[in-house]
Image (cartoon, rainbow, N blue to C red):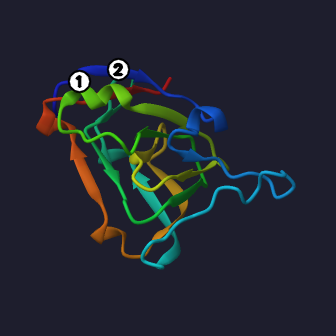
């Protein structure tokens, strides 16, 4: 594990705070419903159930350590947390992660069961990972060919990492 050189506190998910990274789905009765649209450049929209395990990431007394982020340039991704509190970290698509300065752009959000979000194309993301359970289950909408479009920014290659404070 790389040394932690940045601490960020995970905040509750709100539509306003999430807006630089995507959007929070609206109720069908909201007049703004439908203004934001999912995008699938390869016309390969796919729905499935995924999960992330607690042991996929290092833990500290305060939270979890983010050592890498991923992004998809050809499609949006929609997630719905099904079973337990979780945390997700994100950074804007404009970040290159060619230097450690971009770690200042990373934000983290606390997610509760029933929370849903959409990641814009190119948004860097880590997780969601469970906070206190062994596994978080997620309803997932993304491109079926996502493995072909799964850029990775390794913070350890920049001699950087981020500790996400969850409680």
Residue 106 at what x, y percent from top left? 38, 32
Secondary structure beneath disc 2?
A: strand
Q: Quadrant of the N terminus?
A: top left
The quadrant in which residue 29 appears is bottom right
The quadrant in which residue 82 appears is bottom right
Q: What's the residue at 51%, 75% (across, down)?
A: 45
Residue 110 at what x, y percent from top left? 55, 35
Q: Which residue is mark 1?
A: 4
Compared to residue 49, the image places residue 133 above or below, namely: above
C-alpha distance separating marks 2 and 1: 8 Å
- Give 93 or 159, whichever is nearer the viewer: 93
Q: What's the residue at 52%, 57% (across, down)?
A: 137
Residue 9 at what x, y percent from top left? 46, 22
- In the displayed structure image, the side of residue 104 where residue 77 appears, left or right: right
Compared to residue 86, the image places residue 72 above or below, namely: below
Q: Which residue is mark 2?
A: 7
Q: What's the residue at 37%, 59% (across, down)?
A: 72
Q: Residues within 10 Å of mark 2 (few under 14, many from 20)?
A: some
């Amino acid at each position: 594990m790389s040394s932690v050189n940045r601490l960020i506190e995970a905040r509750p998910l709100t539509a306003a705070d999430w807006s630089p990274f995507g959007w929070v789905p609206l109720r069908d009765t909201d007049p703004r419903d439908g203004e934001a649209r999912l995008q699938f450049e390869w016309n390969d929209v796919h729905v499935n159930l995924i999960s992330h395990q607690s042991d996929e990431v290092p833990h500290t007394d305060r939270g979890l350590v983010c050592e890498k982020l991923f992004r998809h340039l050809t499609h949006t991704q929609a997630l719905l947390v099904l079973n337990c509190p979780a945390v997700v970290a994100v950074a804007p698509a404009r970040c290159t992660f060619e230097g450690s300065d971009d770690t200042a752009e990373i934000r983290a959000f606390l997610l509760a069961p029933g929370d849903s979000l959409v990641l814009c194309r190119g948004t860097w993301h880590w997780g969601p990972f469970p906070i206190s359970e062994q596994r978080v289950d997620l309803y997932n909408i993304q491109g079926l060919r996502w493995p072909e479009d799964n850029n990775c920014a390794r913070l350890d290659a920049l001699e950087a990492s981020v500790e996400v404070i969850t409680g």
